[in-house]
Image: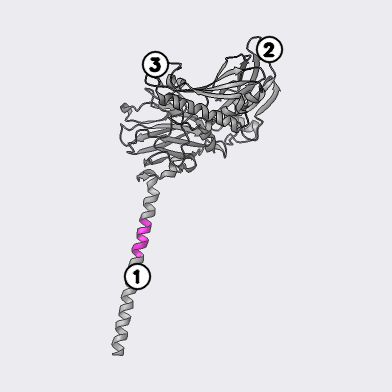
Amino acid sequence: MELTSTIELISYFSGRCFLTRMIFRRFFILIFLTNALTAYSQAGKPIQLGKNASDCLGALLLNDTVVGPVYSPKGWGNKLEIRGYELGDPYFIEKEHNTVWYKFVVPYDAIFTFDLIPNIKTDDFDFLIFQYDGPNFCKDIENGTRIPIRTNISRKNTEVDGRTGLSAASINEYVPSGPGSPYSKALDVKKGEMYYLLVDNPFKENEGHTVYLHFRKVKSDTTRQSQEGKSREEYSIPYRTLQITVTDKDSDNRLASTIGIDGLPDSVQSSYSSVSRVELDVISYRNYEISVVKKGYLLATETFLAKNDSLYKVPIKLKKMELGDRLNLEKIKFEVDDTEILEKSLPALAQLKSFMDANPSVHIEIQGHVNGEAKRNKRKFIKLSEARAEAIYKKLVESGVSKDRMSFKGFGNAKMIYPTPINNRQAEANRRVEIEIVKL
């Protein structure tokens, strides 16, 4: 009995060991096949992205020149970074819809093009390309100070199967919404630069797309290398010169004023007192908000966009303040049908605060207006316009402006600039907040 039991026990464990070896062998084969498929998926396996890929901070790093088909997440991720823009803006979509953020590093000096090919040719895809320029990059996009280096927001073109991207044959850097070329102008890129590509799918088709990156290598400039003692492949920030000059509107004489520039890095001086001219270096492809404040004059603001010119001259003419003068606060934006002031409106509020501080005897009325589609000035229009004017009033009080110097009122759609707007730009002009000087 004991001998028989021992033989049975040996046979049992031998069988178990054999079975175990088979299980491990199959397990390792499965792991190998899985890894092989994962490596191949860069250019072939469908990819369903999660919510984080819809945010700038969660941008998907492209390590290959082909990715897809990619299925966009639904919605705009954890943070709505692009919003509050007008239909027809060449630089931005109105807001994010079903978006994917990609990022990639340029492998060598090249002419960069790409193709975005939808799985279904009737799907509509728009794109924006940004050049990365520092740790605050994503926050700058949210604040509206960083603009794309290329866009294409044109209507889908089924003649090219809905494709879009960059092409060496195209001449436009930016293509706004509506009929237009499906491709924008190619980019001259340098080794080591990083770019972010935002792909937006406004109509929720989510049938997928594939991205093909193309880098046509260019020869290094050996003459320049020898003169400068460094490789052209080393990337340097493209600074441009901004020159601001302030004059009196009537006499054309220069006026010493306080000049502020919003959108500069924190390390760069952004406010200059008692000067009539400022000259400083700025970075390309950024929005800069210029404000000029002088006692006895209306607040003057200007939006400046640095692109590729080496010198930008921005003349600003100040108007002497009179009773009844108005300021259109066009840079203050709200959520649709809401009183929430968008974060990118904060610089404009700061400019208004500076104006009130420089003119302590001035009293203002904050006036709200909406774009009412109906002819009749409905109660809801008046209520919304007044609530928006009050929101600005409260922000100014919080910043230290005395309540006694301000009042607010809502006009609904009673004073539309365009009584029958024919496009979104005119509708946006009707949707505004104005400041009226009621006491000097």
Between 304 and 366, the residue placed more toward the observer is: 366
- The reply to whether the magenta stretch includes residue 151 is no
Which residue: 42% across, 44% down? 51
Q: Which residue is mark 3?
A: 420
Q: Label 3 sits on what residue type?
A: Thr
Distance from label 1 to label 2 (Cα)?
Answer: 93 Å
Q: Label 1 sits on what residue type?
A: Thr
Q: Is residue 433 visible?
A: yes
If the image is split into quadrants, where does the C terminus sit?
top right
Where residue 335 appears, x then y in whole percent?
A: 46, 31
Q: Residues within 10 Å of mark 3 (few under 14, many from 20)?
A: some
Q: Which residue is mark 2?
A: 253
**Mark before the other along the chain sequence, 3 or 2:** 2
Between 133 and 374, the residue placed more toward the observer is: 374
Q: Nearer the viewer, mark 1 or mark 2?
A: 2
Distance from label 3 to label 1 (Cα)?
Answer: 80 Å
Q: Which residue is mark 1?
A: 20
Where residue 373 appears, x then y in whole percent?
A: 38, 21
The magenta span reads: 25-33
Q: Label 2 sits on what residue type?
A: Asn
Q: Residues within 10 Å of mark 1 (few under 14, many from 20)?
A: few
Which residue: 33% across, 67% down? 22
If the image is split into quadrants, where does the N terminus sit?
bottom left
Q: Main SS type for the magenta part? A: helix
Where residue 330 appears, x then y in whole percent?
A: 52, 23
Mark linked to residue 280 = none
